[in-house]
Structure formats: C-alpha cells, structure tokens
Amino acid sequence: MRGSLTKRARRIVEEVAAHTADGKALRRAQALLWREEGESTREVAERLGVSRRTIFNWSARFEERRGLEIARRLEDGLRSGRPRTAREIIDPLIDQLIDQDPREVGYRATVWTAPLLRHYLETEHGIKVSRPSVSLALARLRISWK
C-alpha cells in the first residue's frame, strides 16, 4: 500500500489519528498510516488486534469512498444491523405512563402490571414486546410494584 495516499490525504489521516475521539476511526487511520509506511497487513493486524481481513476491508472501504471527505472515509458506514432495542423504545413510554391510572386510558385495572403494560404498548403504539422486556424496563427505570 506504500505511496497510495496523497500528501494532503496523509496529512488529514494523521490529523484524524491525532485528534479523533472515535476509537474506530483512530484504528482505521493508524492502519492506513502504518501500511503506508510499509508495514505488512499481518503486522498491522497484529498490532491492532484484528484480522488481516479487517485491514483489507478497511483499506478497500477507504478507497471505495473516494467521493467523501477524507475524515468521513474513516468513519463507520451505514449498517442495516439490529433495529433499536426495546430499551430505547419502551423505557420512555413506560416512564411517561407509569404514574397514570390505567383507568384513565381505558383499562379496568387500578394498577399497572407487566402484562397490562405489554398490552398497552401493543395496542396504543403498535410495539410488540415480551413480558420479560417490560419487566426489565421497569427494573431499569427503578419502578417496583407495591
């Protein structure tokens, strides 16, 4: 890979390596710089504790993103991955609702239960979650049953 970065690109990659708070971008920048200096893919991979395939992927992704600013070429790409977790979705909803009497939203119960909260989340918000997920949310919110 020696010599594939322009002087300007090398300067920006060095700046990213020196100043970024993003650990992933730092490691990618280091990998590019070390390979640029002539270290082998194996050496760089061992130094960073990743596979050689990862180093190849980082280098390929950097090259594929030529239309972006150099610093952005070092960032994570969009990932389809997992959707937001139940925690990010249901915790705020439960937190807003828990002090309200269930009768105010059409239930005959006088207190919220995990199954009732689960039913509410599904019917009112279209969110299907398991009873254990609701119980875990209650524990995270430090809500205990009386």
Image: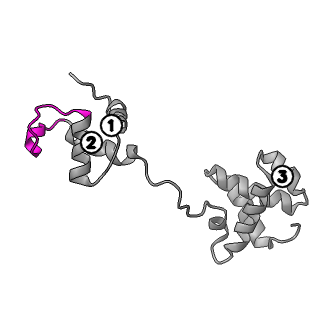
Q: Residue at x 69, y 53 (%)?
A: 26
Label 1 neighbourhood size at 10 Å, few (<14), some (14-19), many (20+)? some
- Foreground residue, 97 or 25? 97
Q: Position of residue 1 (x, y in %)?
A: 86, 67
Kindly report which numbered mark, 3 or 1, lies closer to the viewer in this rendering.
1
Query: Which quadrant of the figure has residue 139?
Result: top left
Sooner in the amino-acid sequence: mark 1 or mark 2: 2
Give the residue at mark 2.
118
Q: Residue at x 73, y 72 (%)?
A: 63
What distance separates the C-alpha of mark 3 from that of mark 2?
Answer: 49 Å
Label 3 neighbourhood size at 10 Å, few (<14), some (14-19), many (20+)? many
Please give left or right for residue 143 compared with residue 39 in the image.
left
Q: Position of residue 39 (x, y in %)?
A: 90, 56
What distance separates the C-alpha of mark 1 from that of mark 2?
Answer: 6 Å
What distance separates the C-alpha of mark 3 from that of mark 1?
Answer: 47 Å
Residue type indicated by callout 1: Arg
Give the residue at mark 3.
44
Q: Does 137 sit above or below residue 39?
A: above
Residue type indicated by callout 2: Arg
Which region shows up in magenta? 99-114
Q: Position of residue 64 (x, y in %)?
A: 70, 73
Residue type indicated by callout 3: Val
Q: Report the disc number at residue 131.
A: 1
Query: Which quadrant of the figure has residue 57?
Result: bottom right
Q: How is the protein colored in the picture?
A: one colour
Q: Are marks 1 and 2 in contact (CB under 8 Å)?
A: yes
Q: Position of residue 47 (x, y in %)?
A: 82, 46
